Image: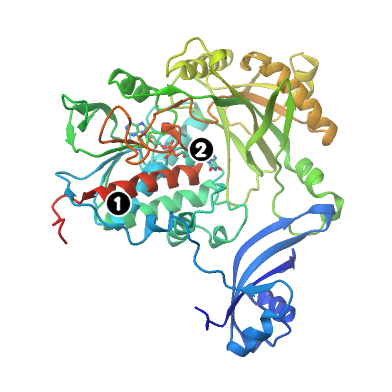
């Protein structure tokens, strides 16, 4: 709107500013205006700038001014500019103004998996009057939290309800980092939906948005209630065990673990990257799948003050800064090793979905206050490290490493080694501290790194140690293996219809399909497939003409 008395302003903010009122005062000052000439100030983006240890936030705000004359004056100030028009990107249509299709569905769409891909697909479908049934092998989040706590306290493991399986999928027990490079306007819509479901509002403007596992759980409950109110049905503790196909190989429905059959010609498959039994069944059923290079490695943990020290330095003393995070990478032997899923103020968790296997990952609470920092140090493995060329070759490699890790300890103790001992090629002795909840056993972690992995890890640790003295020192503890950084296979899809190339009616979505990695990208992938379904079909029982 050309006459709207609004502008965009880019400015630096002191890290000490505390409230919306303080923000308004700073903006008024910057624009040379009185507080009464500003109607409102809204943060659109904020990121910490710690370069040269001069700490400040770089921010972008939208300012609503009292009248058009104020706007003209404000536009003369440095950093001020007109409101950009609505972004012209195809994704805009994903949320608004879709033309519903006219092929009436005989039954509601089925969604397998209540991870980000499945949940946000259900949300978009429900926006257009569809009432999908969401099947989730794990428990609803309230019960799942108890299942995971029991596991972490006693080692009693539930293969259906754990850190990887259950309401919210793998993202529930996570750091809740909402990083994703896309600028899609749908991302904004998803974040707003999460805020409506009680996620912290700062995810709307923080450059590195983070919810935290504790707040995520509450968001999931609100999202479930919102979807149920629109007629979405959730069936927890309900595992899909088989596909029902017609003679032409097209999907006709699903068979559940108790033999019940649910019929539908539309099935969204958002099973994540750890449902190995489901992967095997899909292969038996002839669903096209192919090996995909994936990441594995180890996880490293430091005392958080060490990370704060190398990121912020002594200059940060007394300042209220976010718990420091880092991102490191090093090239050696023609390959890159990089930090992955860094959890400031977090804990290391057993990322396990089958008994007898062990892999690690990290999570954190909203306050990031554990006093420890961990991150995966991973590299990409390709087919030559595996024992075959079939779609499940990567799964077998993961399983081999995870089974070896499980055998080393008692229960789910994690193989552990100080980074300095890894470099010196000796077992660690004495007291080693880690946040991993189920105890640890000293091990030589080189054996979990196939191919050039052990040499690469050694070279990379030396590089990080040179850049940040202490990074691979005595207080740095390695655990592992970290095998599930990404999906080890892909389910090829038709470009336009996004159906499986082998199985019409089957829509592989999210990380398990090999098309996403992370909460936001999995959610967006689910939403994009839901869009195609909205545009092709009309909800069961509706009048497609309307
Ligand atoms: C500990 C941990 C921390 C993480 N931290 C972050 C982070 O901070 N930020 C980030 O962006 N990403 C993070 N990730 C990755 C992120 O969680 C995943 O990329 C994302 O959840 C993938 O979403 P999805 O919906 O594709 O699959 P998933 O979230 O894996 O969901 C799949 C769901 O399908 C269900 N399912 C599987 N098979 C069946 C079946 N046969 N029948 C019925 N249901 C089935 C599973 O129980 C599961 O709930 C983390 C992952 C882990 C494990």
**Left or right of 237, for residue 204:** right
Q: Secondary structure at mark 1?
A: helix
Residue at 42% across, 32% down = 512
Q: Label 2 vs label 1: CA separation?
A: 22 Å
Could you classify mark 2 by the number of other residues whose Cα lies within 10 Å: few (under 14), some (14-19), or many (20 or more)? some
Q: Is residue 543 above or below residue 390?
A: below
Residue lying furthest top: 387
Question: What residue would you read off at disc 1?
Answer: 125
Q: Is residue 539 above or below residue 382?
A: below
Ligand 1, by image quadrant, is top left
The image shows residue 412 at horizontal and vertical percentages of 54, 22
Quarter of the image where one finds residue 248: top left
Q: Secondary structure at mark 2?
A: loop
The image shows residue 525 at horizontal and vertical percentages of 42, 43
Q: Would you say the beta carbon of the disc 2 residue lies within 8 angstroms of ligand 1?
A: yes
Q: Nearer the viewer, residue 68 or 464?
A: 68
Image quadrant containing the C terminus: bottom left
The image shows residue 369 at horizontal and vertical percentages of 65, 48
Question: What residue would you read off at disc 2?
Answer: 517
Of callouts 2 and 1, the N-terminal one: 1
């Amino acid at each position: 709107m050309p006459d709207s008395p609004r502008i965009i302003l880019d400015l630096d903010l002191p890290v000490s500013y505390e409230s919306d009122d303080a923000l308004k005062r700073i903006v008024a000052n910057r624009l040379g205006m009185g507080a009464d000439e500003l109607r409102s100030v809204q943060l659109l983006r904020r990121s910490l700038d710690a370069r040269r240890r001069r700490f400040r936030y770089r921010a972008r705000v939208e300012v609503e001014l009292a009248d058009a004359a104020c706007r003209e004056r404000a536009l003369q100030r440095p950093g001020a500019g007109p409101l950009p028009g609505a972004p012209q990107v195809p994704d805009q249509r994903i949320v608004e103004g879709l033309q519903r299709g006219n092929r009436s569905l005989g039954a509601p769409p089925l969604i397998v998996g209540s991870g980000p891909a499945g949940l946000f697909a259900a949300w978009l479908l429900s926006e257009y009057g569809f009432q999908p049934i969401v099947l989730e092998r794990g428990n609803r989040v309230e019960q799942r939290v108890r299942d995971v706590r029991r596991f972490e306290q006693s080692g009693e493991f539930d293969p259906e309800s754990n850190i990887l399986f259950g309401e919210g999928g793998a993202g529930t027990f996570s750091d809740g980092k909402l990083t994703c490079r896309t600028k899609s306007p749908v991302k904004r819509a998803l974040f707003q939906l999460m805020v409506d479901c009680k996620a912290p509002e700062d995810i709307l403007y923080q450059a590195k948005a983070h919810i935290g596992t504790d707040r995520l759980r509450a968001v999931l409950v609100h999202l479930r209630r919102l979807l149920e109110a629109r007629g979405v049905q959730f069936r927890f503790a309900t595992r899909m065990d088989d596909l029902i196909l017609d003679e032409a190989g097209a999907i006709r429905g699903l068979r559940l673990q108790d033999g019940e059959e649910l019929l539908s010609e539309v099935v969204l498959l958002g099973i994540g990257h750890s449902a190995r039994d489901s992967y095997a069944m899909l292969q038996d059923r002839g669903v096209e799948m192919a090996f995909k290079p994936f990441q594995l490695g180890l996880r490293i943990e430091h005392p958080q003050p060490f990370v704060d020290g190398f990121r912020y330095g002594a200059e940060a003393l007394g300042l209220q800064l976010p718990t420091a995070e880092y991102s490191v990478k090093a090239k050696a032997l023609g390959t890159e090793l990089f930090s992955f899923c860094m959890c400031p103020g977090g804990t290391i968790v057993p990322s396990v979905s089958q008994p007898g296997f062990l892999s690690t990952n990290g999570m954190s609470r909203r306050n990031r206050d554990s006093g420890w920092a961990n991150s995966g140090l991973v590299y990409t493995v390709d087919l030559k490290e595996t024992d075959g060329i079939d779609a499940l070759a990567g799964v077998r490699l993961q399983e081999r490493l995870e089974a070896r890790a499980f055998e080393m300890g008692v229960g789910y103790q994690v193989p552990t080694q100080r980074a300095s001992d890894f470099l010196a090629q000796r077992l660690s002795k004495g007291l080693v501290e880690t946040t991993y909840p189920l105890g640890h056993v000293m091990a030589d972690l080189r054996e979990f790194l196939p191919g050039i992995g052990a040499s690469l890890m050694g070279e990379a640790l030396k590089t990080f140690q040179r850049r940040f003295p202490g990074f691979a020192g005595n207080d740095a503890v390695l655990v592992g293996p970290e095998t599930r950084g990404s999906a080890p296979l892909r389910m090829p899809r038709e470009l336009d219809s996004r159906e499986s190339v082998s199985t019409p009616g089957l829509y592989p979505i999210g990380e398990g399909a090999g098309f996403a990695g992370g909460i936001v990208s999995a959610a967006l992938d689910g939403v994009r497939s839901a869009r195609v379904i909205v545009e092709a079909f009309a909800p069961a029982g509706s009048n497609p003409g309307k």
